[in-house]
Image: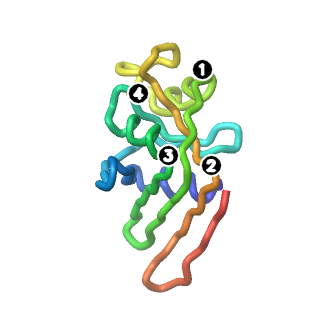
Amino acid sequence: MQTVYEFIKKCGTYYLATMEGDQPRVRPFGTIDLFEGKLYIQTGKVKEVSKQIQANPKVEISAFDGTKWIRVAGKLVRDDRIEPKTHMLDAYPHLKAMYSPEDENTEVLYFEDAVATISSFTEAPVEIKF
């Protein structure tokens, strides 16, 4: 999982795909964190993306570093504890102007039953399950 985290972190921006009914929705994200051995993302509960994840927690993210790309497919699970929210916001201090570990909006979610695939045009794909 460390490899997955480092790859996505290095890319800076990744794209999160959710479903809204039968319509896929994709948007850029930039928050990725490792906490207690789990891969986390962050958003706000008032956002449509949060509502989509709660309705259907199966998501996929994708990022490209210029030569290789990663896809991570799995289920996102909301973690309402203060500790992972604090850890995430400490990793992204610029978000503290909009989010707080104690507010009712800050949402962190971790991947469960996930499979990451790192691919390129020149090497065999590498699959990592977590």
Residue pointed to by mark 3: 57
Give the Cα separation between the discs numbered 3 and 2.
10 Å
Foreground: disc 4 or disc 3: 3
CA–CA distance between discs 2 and 4? 19 Å
Q: Residue at x 52, y 59 (%)?
A: 73
- What residue sits 55% from the left and 55% below the top? 74
Answer with mark 1 or mark 3, whichever residue precedes in sequence: 3
- Residue 58 % position (x, y): 49, 52
Q: Earlier in the sequence, mark 2 or mark 4?
A: 4
Give the label, 1 or 4, closer to the camera.
4
Secondary structure of residue under mark 3: loop
Give amino acid for label 2: Glu
- Amino acid type, callout 1: Ile
Look at mark 2 in the image and give the residue it sits on. 112
Q: Mark 3 Cα within 10 Å, few/some/many (few <14, many 20+)?
A: many
Residue receiving disc 4: 45
Mark sitting earlier along the chain (1/4): 4
Q: Which numbered disc flags the more N-terminal residue, 1 or 2?
A: 1
Q: Position of residue 121 (x, y in %)?
A: 43, 83
Q: Secondary structure at mark 2?
A: strand
Compute the Cα span from label 4 to label 3: 14 Å
Closest to the observer, 97 or 41: 41
Of the residues under marks 3 and 2, which one precedes in the sequence?
3
Does residue 43 sit above or below 117 in this rendering? above
Q: Which residue is mark 1?
A: 82
For marks 1 and 2, give the one nearer the viewer: 2
